[in-house]
Amino acid sequence: MTQFCLSFQNFRLHQRKAHTSEAGINNSLADVTRMTWKRIGLQGITTQDFKTTYLSLSGYEAVLAWFEDIDVNLKTVLNYTKNFMQFMKYINIDMDLLLVSNDQREYNRLTCLQVHISNMRSGLDSGVFELHKRQMNSKPMPPTPTEVKWVLAVAKADFYKGMDELRKKDDSGPILTKTRIAFINRYITAYLCLGQGIHVGEAENMYSSEFQAAYNGEWMLSDRGEPHIVVHVANHKTNVTQDCRIALNPYWTDNFDLYFRYLCTIIFRLKNPTHPYFFTQSDGHHFRKVSDWIKKLQKQYKVPKITSSTARCSWVERRPEAHRE
């Protein structure tokens, strides 16, 4: 096994011990691989016999120049540099190489190289910050919450009709059509993503048990004195850094309970009794196309397409004057 392959595999194990996600590890190692072979290739060195001595400041500068020639995004270049610096730091502590005792001179050289690349990384950091600032200054204001929720207003009458049909159903009555079920699904999730500004993944991954816990728990009062329940969604993409709480007033609590009791419990659970998710499709499977279905709802009612990310920007930007319904 070559020196690079050995350190590469050891670096993977090193990151796993730090509880880095597999996706994060794979992305990091992919960046390291591309940058390593490109930098030594630009120096005319064969990739068959990699050695740490092939890592040089001139090689790194050649890669930066190559990135600039093909117009690679500055933030991407910064990410490549960050991941490669982590790998270089690991090489100096790799127990199989043990450069600190086996090759003190190479150890010191790599340490100095890290300082030089770290200095250049600071320049990339500043460049990314300036680029972000220019982009934010030139970025148009997001639509108002009223514009974001326009599809909810246009489709409101049909939603009322669908929920009234649900209220009149019983366990033995005829079920709704797939089209009507899909519409109710789309409208409720559009309310969460466009009407409250939550991420689509939070709507997709809400558990029935999470709604039930909130529904059977204590009601709270908003700043305006309105009673509501709060649904805590634990399993979503950003759950490590962000806490998802969905507030439902009495009207929406009733709609969610009706959806849960009739659609989830009576219809879908008969087809797939094991799934834990709140939002399901007419075949009883997990409802995982929220962003696509919101677009279809907007297309159906011929209103401008507004994504959930744009909706979040709108709610954050105008939170002081925005009042959620």
Image (tube, rainbow, N blue to C red):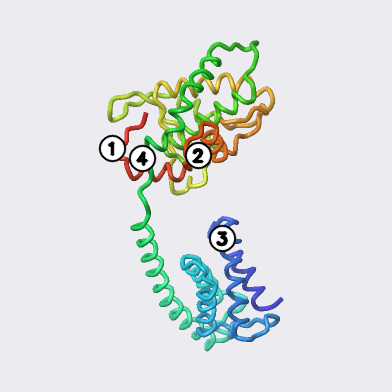
Q: CA distance from mark 1 to mark 3?
A: 46 Å
First in sequence: mark 1 vs mark 3? 3
- Taking the spot 58% from the left edge, 70% from the top edge, the residue there is 32
Between circles 3 and 2, the one closer to the viewer is: 2
- Camera-side residue: 90 or 324? 324
Between circles 4 and 1, the one closer to the viewer is: 4
Between circles 2 and 1, the one closer to the viewer is: 1
The amino acid marked with disc number 1 is: Glu
First in sequence: mark 3 vs mark 2? 3
Which residue position is annotated with label 1? 321
The amino acid marked with disc number 3 is: Lys
Between circles 4 and 2, the one closer to the viewer is: 4
First in sequence: mark 4 vs mark 2? 4
- Taking the spot 37% from the left edge, 69% from the top edge, the residue there is 126
The amino acid marked with disc number 2 is: Glu
Between circles 4 and 3, the one closer to the viewer is: 4
Asked which secondary structure carries label 3, the reply is helix
- What is the number of the mark on residue 144? 4
- Point out residue 86 in the picture as x, y percentages from the top left corner: 51, 70
Which residue position is annotated with label 3? 17
**Along the horizontal axis of the image, is 118 left or right of 184?**
left
- What is the number of the mark on residue 202? 2
Q: CA distance from mark 4 to mark 1?
A: 10 Å
Q: In the rendered structure, are the residues bearing label 4 and label 1 in contact, judged by CB atoms less than 8 Å apart?
A: no
